[in-house]
């Protein structure tokens, strides 16, 4: 007899975490003083490149707070501030749910 005795169940849940890459996201315009901006996606900080007038800014001129998705940056007056980065959605969401019961 290969049929199991009693109740057997199996549950499968596929969790999908959306992710992507952003190149040249227009963040704002430099004022020469510290500013804050919210990025469109939750950036992976290790991939974040902040540019002013298409030139990468030194790390000393910007910081990123991933808990609030906020970029703090000091860029020269009148320069376009852009961001390049990889992102991952937070949190993951339930995409598919299936249950099988054998009694």
Image: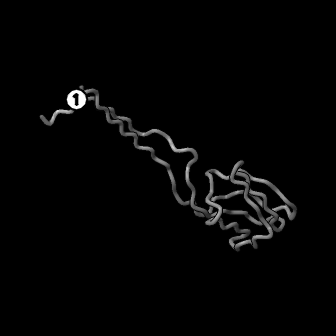
Of the 4 image quadrants, the one containing the C terminus is: top left
Residue at figure coordinates x 73%, y 68% from the top left: 52
The residue where tag 1 is placed is 5
Q: Nearer the viewer, residue 59 or 50?
A: 59
Q: Position of residue 79 (x, y in %)?
A: 77, 66
Left or right of 90? Residue 65 is right
Q: Position of residue 17 (x, y in %)?
A: 49, 49
Residue at figure coordinates x 52%, y 44% from the top left: 92
Residue at figure coordinates x 35%, y 36% from the top left: 11
Q: Residue furthest right?
A: 33
Q: Nearer the viewer, residue 34 or 13?
A: 13
Q: Position of residue 15 (x, y in %)?
A: 45, 44
Is 52 placed above or below 39 here?
Answer: below
Left or right of 100? Residue 49 is right
User: In terms of image quadrants, where is residue 9?
Assistant: top left
User: Total marks drawn?
Assistant: 1
Q: Position of residue 3 (x, y in %)?
A: 17, 33
Q: Residues within 10 Å of mark 1 (few under 14, many from 20)?
A: few
User: In terms of image quadrants, where is residue 85?
Assistant: bottom right
Under tag 1, what secondary structure? loop
Is 24 placed above or below 88 here?
Answer: below
Q: How is the image coloured?
A: one colour
User: In terms of image quadrants, where is residue 45?
Assistant: bottom right
Q: Residue furthest left?
A: 1
Residue at figure coordinates x 76%, y 73% from the top left: 58
Of the 4 image quadrants, the one containing the N terminus is: top left
Is 61 placed above or below 6 here?
Answer: below
Q: Nearer the viewer, residue 40 or 7?
A: 7
């Amino acid at each position: 007899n290969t049929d199991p005795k009693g109740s057997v169940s199996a549950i499968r849940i596929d969790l999908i975490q959306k992710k992507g890459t952003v190149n040249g996201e227009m963040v704002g315009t430099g004022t020469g003083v510290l500013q804050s901006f919210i990025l469109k996606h939750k950036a992976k900080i290790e991939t974040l490149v902040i540019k002013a007038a298409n030139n990468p800014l030194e790390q000393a001129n910007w910081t990123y707070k991933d808990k609030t998705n906020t970029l703090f940056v000091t860029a020269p007056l009148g320069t376009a501030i852009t961001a390049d980065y990889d992102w991952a959605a937070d949190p993951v969401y339930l995409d598919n749910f299936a249950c099988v019961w054998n009694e």
